[in-house]
Image (spheres, rainbow, N blue to C red):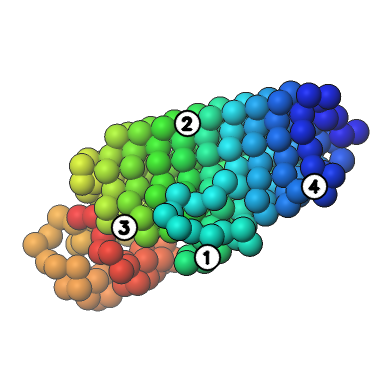
Amino acid sequence: MTHIHPRAVVAPEAKLGSDVSVGAFSVIGPGVVVGRGTSIGSHVIIEGIAEIGERCQISCHVVLGAPPQILEDQSETTRLVVGDETVIREYASVHRGSLKGRGTTMLGQRNYIMAYAHVGHDCVLGDDVVVSSQAGLAGHVEVEDRAVIGGKAGIHQFVRIGKYAMVGACSAVSKDIPPFMMAHGNRAKCYGLNTVGLRRYGVSREAIVKLKQAYRAIFLSKLNTSQALERLATEVDSCPEVEHLIHFIKISSRGIAR
């Protein structure tokens, strides 16, 4: 049974699924759809065209679907989509897309957005992504599945972060972080495989060995990126993880953090 606190403001046009709860002083706008079983705390603002999935947990003072932080942007028709079972903690903010971008900010399933974190306009996050406290993602950032972004990290607009990657706390990231890597610093550089994360998520020992070989070729040799990829094609046995790493690097427009 849906429970709306008497001091919450929910627009009549908003669509709330079954078993949704809305805390005191929260404001839910007319373009909002909330999936069943989602819990919305107190003092939450959800505005614009926003679709919140099922069984999400939205903590107090969160702002979702606010306009992009772009001068002169008109974004009334743009959207925010939040996947099922996502947790968004206190004071975090996620802005909707922009007309000049893809038009939609999209979070996958089971993401964990910690306190005071910010996800900017037109960002796309995969599934099981962790954005730690006070980290900030500028507009158009793409984060693949199961990546972890450390506290107070700043991610430059249009940067891509590959799956299973881990960005260290307080990093300033201006180039793409390839999948499976650990990165840290200002400006962030890769310094090894995220082997703990790879094992935790069931990546095989054989694949980890091949990824280590790929890491040495790309980051520890004196070869440039193109030469390193050529070496990988001839000297490292292929597997899905290595193929994904190579593809990620080949389509990078900003270049990778080395």
User: Which one is earlier in the sequence, the residue at label 1 or at label 3?
Assistant: 1
Seen in the image, is 113 located left or right of residue 34?
A: left
Disc 1 to disc 4, C-alpha distance:
23 Å
Write down the residue under mark 3. Answer: 176
Disc 2 to disc 4, C-alpha distance:
26 Å
Write down the residue under mark 1. Answer: 99
Task: Indicate the quadrant containing the N terminus: top left, top right, bottom left or bottom right.
Answer: top right
Give the image location of residue 152, x and y in percent: 35, 33
Write down the residue under mark 2. Answer: 116
Task: Give the label, 2 or 4, closer to the camera.
Answer: 4
Disc 4 to disc 3, C-alpha distance:
38 Å
Which residue: 58% across, 38% down? Answer: 63
Give yes or no for contact between labels 1 and 4 (Cβ–Cβ under 8 Å).
no
Give the image location of residue 51, x and y in percent: 70, 51
Mark 1, Cα crowd under 10 Å, few <14 / some 14-19 / many 20+, is some
Give yes or no for contact between labels 2 and 4 (Cβ–Cβ under 8 Å).
no
Give the image location of residue 184, x and y in percent: 26, 41
Task: Label 1, secondary structure: give it.
Answer: loop
Write down the residue under mark 4. Answer: 14
Query: Which three-letter amino acid code belongs to the residue tagged 4?
Result: Ala
Task: Label 4, secondary structure: give it.
Answer: loop
Seen in the image, is 52 located left or right of residue 257?
A: right
User: Which one is earlier in the sequence, the residue at label 4 or at label 3?
Assistant: 4
Task: Give the label, 2 or 1, closer to the camera.
Answer: 1
Which residue: 73% across, 52% down? Answer: 31
Query: What is the residue that sits farthest to the left in this orientation?
Result: 222
Looking at the image, residue 132 lies above or below residue 35:
above
User: Which one is earlier in the sequence, the residue at label 2 or at label 4?
Assistant: 4
Return the residue nearer the eye: 62 or 75: 75
Q: Is residue 119 at all visible to an observer of this figure? A: yes
